[in-house]
């Protein structure tokens, strides 16, 4: 009787969260991501991308797509998810090459500067 | 044959080991560009959803309303039961109906009499005509001009 009760209490120990992290090596991307965020460069890059996409009318294109979709589906039947799925493929394809090149160049120079 | 294989292996090994960081950088850069772009896309979708939900895009509703009204108007025009015989009860674009004869009463600005609006035009003919006749009677010297005026 005692044994079974003791058996029911016995549990494997809760895995120590810290131990897990130490076992796993952070990936290169994770390291760079942290450096990007800590240096503030990620925010600057995002602002730059937003500005360039605004200037070239990409944002207006995406908003127009959303508007016609909303008109068809009805103002209150549209979810954020719908819109994300709508504009993601078109958005990715519609980025002008010079904009993409500029951003990639900025990111690459950051990578160089962090001596990786 | 074995020499060839060894040669290929060495070449591949050398290619992989001496791959410039550039390739790696390009791949990582691409990854982060994708992340940034997805983030911007999410922001735009969020903004558009907000505009849609709050009805801030006035053009959206206005267009819908116009389309609906024009469809209604077209249906009414095409409807054969709406003939000119019913013109008394036809509704204009402001939603008003007008009786065949205007029934408002006001004062004639010429003679000061109370006139029904629907009878105002024929009244004016006589009213202003009489005034002119009076003027003609007063000025005998201009009978020629009066004769031309009087029809």
Image (tube, rainbow, N blue to C red):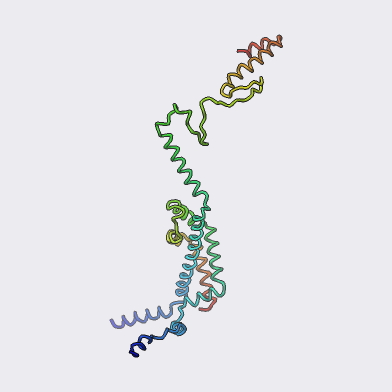
Q: Quadrant of residue A39?
A: bottom right
Q: Residue at x 46, y 40 (%)?
A: B70
Which residue occupies the foreground of this view, A24 or A100? A24
* Residue B132: image location, x then y, percent: 66, 15
Which residue occupies the foreground of this view, B45 or B132? B132
The reply to whether residue A58 is visible in this rendering is no
- Quick check: A107 above or below B5? above
* Residue B136: image location, x then y, percent: 68, 12
Direction left: furthest residue: B1
* Residue A95: image location, x then y, percent: 48, 61
Side of B134 relative to A13 (left or right): right
Direction bottom: furthest residue: A2
The reply to whether residue B10 is visible in this rendering is yes
Q: Residue at x 62, y 13 (%)?
A: B150
Q: Residue at x 47, y 30 (%)?
A: B89
Side of B148 relative to B64 (left or right): right
Count every numbered label the image shows and give the total. Answer: 0
Direction front: furthest residue: A1
């Amino acid at each position: 009787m005692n044994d079974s009760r003791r058996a029911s209490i016995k549990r494997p120990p809760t895995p120590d969260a810290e131990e897990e992290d130490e076992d796993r090596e952070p990936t290169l991307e994770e390291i760079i991501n942290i450096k990007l965020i800590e240096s503030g460069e990620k925010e600057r890059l995002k602002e730059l991308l937003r500005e360039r996409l605004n200037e070239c009318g990409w944002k207006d294109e995406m908003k127009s797509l959303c508007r016609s979709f909303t008109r068809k589906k009805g103002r209150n039947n549209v979810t954020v998810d719908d819109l994300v799925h709508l504009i993601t493929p078109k958005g990715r394809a519609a980025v002008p090459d010079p904009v993409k090149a500029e951003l990639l160049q900025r990111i690459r120079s950051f990578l160089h500067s962090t001596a990786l | 044959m074995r020499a060839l294989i060894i040669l290929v292996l060495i070449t591949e090994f050398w290619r992989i080991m001496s791959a410039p960081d550039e390739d790696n950088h390009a791949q990582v850069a691409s990854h982060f560009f994708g992340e940034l772009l997805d983030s911007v896309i999410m922001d735009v979708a969020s903004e558009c959803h907000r505009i849609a939900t709050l009805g801030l895009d006035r053009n959206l509703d206005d267009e819908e309303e116009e389309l609906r009204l024009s469809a209604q108007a077209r249906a009414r025009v095409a409807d054969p039961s709406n003939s000119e015989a019913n013109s008394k009860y036809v509704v204009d674009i402001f939603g008003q109906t007008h009786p065949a004869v205007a029934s408002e009463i006001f004062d004639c600005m010429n003679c000061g009499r109370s006139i029904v609006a629907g009878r105002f035009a024929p009244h004016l003919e006589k009213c202003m005509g009489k005034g002119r006749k009076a003027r003609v009677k007063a000025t005998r010297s201009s009978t020629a001009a009066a004769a031309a005026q009087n029809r």
